[in-house]
Amino acid sequence: MMLVRGGLVLDPRSLRFEPADVVVEGDTIVTLAAPNSVSHEGRQVVEAAGMLVMPGLVNGHNHAQTNLAKGLSDRWTLELLLNHSPWTGGRRTLEEKYISAAVGACEMLKKGCTASFDMFAEFPLPTVDGVNAVAQAYVDVGLRATIAPMMADKSFFEAIPGLADALPPGLREQALAIRNAPYAQSLAVCRELLINWRWDRNQVRPALGPTIPHHCSDDFLRGCRDLAQEFDLGLQMHVAESKMQAVVAHKKYGHSLVTHLDELGLLKPGFCVAHGVWLDGDDRARLAHRGCSVSHNPGSNMKLGSGLADTRSMLDAGVGLALGTDGAGSSDNLNMWEAMRMASFVSRVHGRDIGQWLSTPEVLRAATEGGAKALGFEGVIGRLSPGYKADMVLLDLSAPHYVPLNDPVNQIVHCEDGTGVHTVIVGGRVLLQAGRFTAFDFDALRAKAAAAVERLAEVNREARALSEQLEPFVNQYCSGLAASPFHVQAFCQH
């Protein structure tokens, strides 16, 4: 049993901080009590005087395989990121998959994030051992996660109409030799993984992640739909992330990616769009009608030049809104405080009507309860209420950005950068105290990560050289495709 006493606790209804003690039994909150009204005898006491106590942040979109690739890129669009993925995320040993996932989990924990939706990718198809290695990393660090094997049956060069033909012959053959496994093999692996799922679903849940609609055949998408229905799984896909994706959708399907997914029957509660920068009004209406969510990743969207998602229109339509960092290969950090600050600011560049800007309470809900829904943990995490899991963050009010304390919610969203995180509790376990890991050896992990990066640089040398040769052709073709007249007419509001 645990007693978190003396702090200012976030009320989930008013989103105001009030003095209260949090009483925990096992891994669950049993009550929020008046200060000093509960005996501490027989309980582990966590002193929270001088601190704000709030739910752990929930990262709505992440990629475990990219954590060893942070800082490798600059001036890459999404399409260039995909072009370089064979060497930035390829040829990993099982141990390196674990190391990469653990590095990301530790960064999130250090920065007050207690759960994440992880679209973990392996090439040419997911593996049971690989997904289990990532799950083990989350369990060892102590975070919750929803893990969706990210998969496709078409390569990047097969998925973009005309791209392969735009390559010089010598490079074309090499690019087309990079192939994903047939979809039946990926589905068979997922089925085996699900039948033998060995993790506590209160900590690590399975989902499916067919990566981008046009990177997957319709038969593959139908197979994912049926598997998700059979095993009651969530789905997450990159949808309308970049301008080029929106253009390709109309070239390939004659309508948007969301419309295509709806026609295939994939949209349902538990479906989460990652990014959704180039959604139109009909897309948002469809997503809302089907009970879907969008994980808004403003940092990655800006770094990759993908655009600025219209989150106000999503909320007005009734779409569930989560926040995410995306993977460290595109955003370079997994800082959900930064994601909140950017989400607030990005909402303000669409116009001068302040009523359309996201409020700080809306942003905070997206980073907690909105993320919980996207992960399939709705009603389990994301708020400090009786019956919810005891996942919480204690923020030190002596940190400079809380001096003076004028409005805690505004200062959490606009001022906090992770340096105010003092204590992190997940499921009633103190995993970070005074900024230090209490249950995981991060120093040992650092040494393993350094050795892994050194090995990967050598084994991926040829793959990197090929990607660098392909880069100018990919950039020219995809940028030209995104600048087509259709794009300008359909999405001029961006």
Image (cartoon, rainbow, N blue to C red):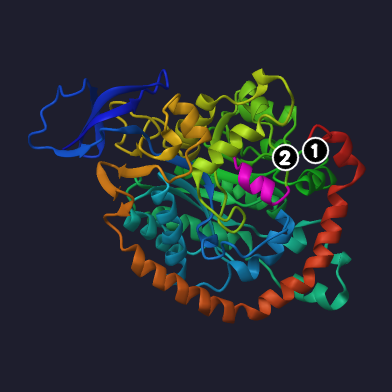
Residue 93 appears in view: no
Tell me the quarter of the picture where residue 355 sits. Answer: top right
The residue depicted at 37 percent of the width and 49 percent of the height is 143
Q: Which quadrant would the C terminus be assigned to in this image? A: top right
The residue depicted at 42 percent of the width and 47 percent of the height is 111
Magenta region, mostly helix, strand or loop? Answer: helix
Please, what secondary structure does the residue beneath circle 1 have? loop
Q: Are marks 2 and 1 in contact (CB under 8 Å)?
A: yes
The correct choice, above or below, for 356 with respect to 394 in the image is above
Judged from this view, the residue extending furthest toward the left is 41
User: Between residues 399 and 359, which one lies in front from this camera angle?
Assistant: 399
The correct choice, above or below, for 429 with respect to 63 in the image is above
User: Between residues 180 and 307, which one lies in front from this camera angle?
Assistant: 307
User: Between residues 348 and 143, which one lies in front from this camera angle?
Assistant: 348
Task: List x then y, in percent, for residue 217.
Answer: 70, 53
The correct choice, above or below, for 449 with respect to 139 in the image is below
Judged from this view, the residue extending furthest toward the right is 485
Mark 1 residue crowding within 10 angstroms, few (<14) / some (14–19) / many (20+): some
Type of the residue with mark 2 = His
Tell me the quarter of the picture where residue 57 sits. Answer: top left
The residue depicted at 41 percent of the width and 63 percent of the height is 133
Task: List x then y, in percent, for residue 250.
Answer: 82, 42
Q: Which quadrant would the N terminus be assigned to in this image? A: top left
Residue at image mark 2: 260
Q: Is residue 102 magenta?
A: no
The residue depicted at 35 percent of the width and 45 percent of the height is 201
Mark 2 residue crowding within 10 angstroms, few (<14) / some (14–19) / many (20+): some
Tell me the quarter of the picture where residue 261 sits. Answer: top right
Type of the residue with mark 1 = His
Tell me where the magenta segment starts and ends, as one range: 296-305
Residue at image mark 1: 255
